[in-house]
Amino acid sequence: MKRTSPWAQRAWLILPLLAAFLLLAAAGQARAAVDEGALQQLATGDFGARIAAIEAIGAGGGEEARRVIAALGAGELGVLDGRVVIVRDGRVTDVGGAVVEAAPDAVDLLRVNNRVRRALATANAALDLSADDATRRLAAAQTLRDNASETLLPVLERALESEQDDAIREIVLLAAAKVNLNADDPAKRLKAVTALGESSDPAVKALLEPFMAQDNGTWREPDALVREAAAASIAAIERRVAVAQNIGTVFSGLSLGSILLLAALGLAITYGVMGVINMAHGELLMVGAYATFVVQGLFRAHLPEWVDWYVVAAIPAGFLAAAAVGVVMERSVLRFLYGRPLESLLATWGISLVLIQAARVVFGPQNVELANPVWMSGGVELAAGVVLPWNRIVILGFAAFVLFLVWLMMNRTRLGMFVRAVTQNRAMAGCVGVPTARVDTLAFAIGAGIAGLGGVALSQISNVGPAMGTGYIVDSFMVVVLGGVGQLAGAVWAAMGLGIVSKFLEGWAGAVIAKILVLVFIIAFIQKRPQGIFALKGRFADN
Amino acid sequence: MRTPLTVRLFAKLPRAGWAALALFALFAWVWVPVAHLALPADHALHLSSYWVSLLGKILCYMVVAVAMDLIWGYAGILSLGHGLFFALGGYAFGMYLMRQIGRDGSYGADLPDFMVFLDWKELPWYWTGSDSFLWALLLVVAVPGLLAWVFGYFAFRSRIKGVYFAIITQALTYAAMLLFFRNETGFGGNNGFTDFKRILGYGITTPEMRVILFALSAALLAGVLLLGRYLVTSRFGRVLTAIRDAESRVMFIGYNPLHYKLFIWTLSAVLCGLAGALYVPQVGIINPSEMSPANSIEIAVWVAVGGRGTLVGAVLGAGIVNLAKSWFTVSFPEYWPFFLGFLFIAVTLFLPNGVIGLWSKLRGRHAPATEEEAEPAPAPAAEPAVLTAPPTESTRGAAA
């Protein structure tokens, strides 16, 4: 009894709504007769006439029109004695739904070719423009924007009067303006040209360009005012496209920068504390990414209903897996090589070889497949062709989150204080009682764990394979060098700056040249400021 | 200083060294040609073409290892970009080899095949003169030398050293690899140069040519060893070692480390280039993967395995690692990366002075005094600890 009562309540709420809807539908039926002339054209005309008729029917709107269009699309519309009829389930009816006494075989079915199909789509869109569902209206508006014609103008204008949704309105406005571009009345053209200036679509710009063209010294567009408006609109569109593209580039730069930052943060800690470049750092990213893969597998096998949230569970898993590898590395190899940075470099390179090969043996040499969860797929469309993918936005936020945690750890905890102390002066820190050996291990574990977090992030936007980490060590070291050792702020600026600069250079000169230019820039930069953007000052500066 | 260079050169080597060199010469210039050319193929001592090519290749690697030892072992500069200079030398000579193919390529055109494939109509400007053997030799020396000089000048001038320098050189070779992977760069892209036909008009695959190339590689190695020996025992070498152990102090007493480092760095690059030029005709291919950072870092491991700062150690290390590599990649290809990885770790942990260090340790305490070849690696303990920074960073860092 308890279970049914809410349902019963809801049913009472729904009933009046249903009644209202039925009334409305009946009202629609009342004025839903299709234009007889158009039907006649459909029945007897050639293909060109039929297409015009289909559009006219679509533009007219109403229940009957919907039925005709649907029947034509399904191949159920035919001609019987010069009249349009519908054949369905062996019954012949007229467009109003009344039964016609005739054998279905006697009906000459209308054939549908590609041109007709396109006209049908437009007509359907015209009908959908008055649908209740906003997404259907949006899709309809988009279809009409791409295939607008004079016949549809009334539909568009009607939609403009009633449409409440701004996004849809804008598209309909564009569609109407597109049609009006070819109007004979200069005032209409002027209005259309000005309206199109609101767009940020390069395709619209192409529509306006003919207005600025000359044929043998005479302007194609006779009216100077319209020409001026067209020039202004083109300039506006160009500006908007450029801004959108720049925003897109800055965003992909920030996205690259966030990955670099995640890779470099851990490296900055280990390099700062121990003066050791961990050449296996990229492989710690790989460990994090493979941990994500394993977590995904576990979720698929045991918690399929939660599989969309495996990434969240992978965050601690990636951190712990990479940190564990880091502790083993530090305890078994690196601690015996303190003070011999170049040799530790070689040893960690050896570790990276072993880790890569181990991944190859365990997971196979191919890239493994990781699915983006639903909430991370798709993106925000800024303008035509400029999309900010959700997974990159999420990673940007994640990088900020990790950065915040590292900042907290370094500046607000006792361990962080110890790490900073050892970074600045190992001997002195040891003298005042900092357990330097334990700090080393912990710092290394944390640095490795952060790399693992980077791997979790990376697994969502790039391939996960045994060699995925090799490309990152140079880049992340560059971030550390550029930012200055042990400087969080420096690492952030360097990572984001490097990311944005390389994305802009990539757009301008291609990926490889961009990489080389960035490298040359860094070498030149180190000439000027060997200690990075944020140099340590005072007694710690000379080292 | 007044004694002629040749005399000084000869005096630098102990008798055992001369004996070893003579044995080596006998092996490379007498035994290998005889065993490969004169003995019939079914003779027990016949040396197959596989082995001649393999040994020739390893000789080139040994030259690279000595060049690496000169800068790492004696000047304390670890380069992770030496594969770049090696590959540049190879590419410079490879251009000549490509032109020597003439119209025998699969397209039968005047241009190298890959250019025909890219639909290029004429040679790019930097291929000018590549049909001349002498120009090719000049490029082999000049291109790596010039690049090293410019790069080294800027790096050493701002006193970039240690791991910074190592990583920047690695980035350099990485960037160059990306550049050479592009088809538009004009060096064959992915596939690089291959299908060579002849040198100076003589067929490149003939046994005679193989033996000649082998003998030339051996001569280069012997020459490089003697030159290296001369350099490191000269006054120049002593300053270099001093820079390695305490650069600041060398500066305080009035030396400018820039010139010393720059000279040995450029020389090392040129030697790598020469080795690369001899390597390419023997293996018959050069492509951008030679520039991959992994290759360059492997060079460092050859030197570490043999023992740094000994020259002979570098030769031994290159030989041991590469023979092991040939054996592994044929017998257990999956385990080679494991072996190499653990070799990196084991050598740095347990054999800081490499095989040579191990040997002189086994021969007892008095061994280093009599065995000059096994000059002990730098002993940081010799430095007074008072003025130096914590023993973690700068003091012992120089030793690494």
Image (cartoon, helix red, strand yellow):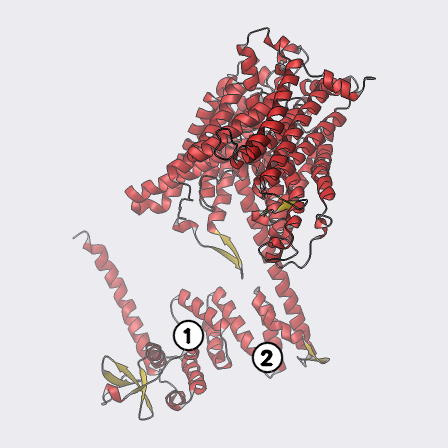
Residue A110 in percent (x, y) is at 35, 84
Label 2 neighbourhood size at 10 Å, few (<14), some (14-19), many (20+)?
some
Name the residue nearer the viewer: B105 or B70: B105
Q: Chain of mark 1?
A: A
Query: Under tag 1, what secondary structure?
Result: helix
Question: What's the amino acid at mark 2?
Answer: Lys
Answer with left or right where residue A144 lies relative to residue B173: left
Name the residue nearer the viewer: A210 or B64: B64
Answer with left or right where residue B70 lies relative to residue A136: right
Residue A333 in percent (x, y) is at 48, 22
Quadrant showing the N terminus of chain B: top right
Name the residue nearer the viewer: A413 or A42: A42
Quadrant showing the C terminus of chain B: top right
The extreme bottom residue here reads A81
Residue A111 in percent (x, y) is at 36, 82
Q: Tell me, yes or no, whether dots 1 and 2 are on the same chain.
A: yes
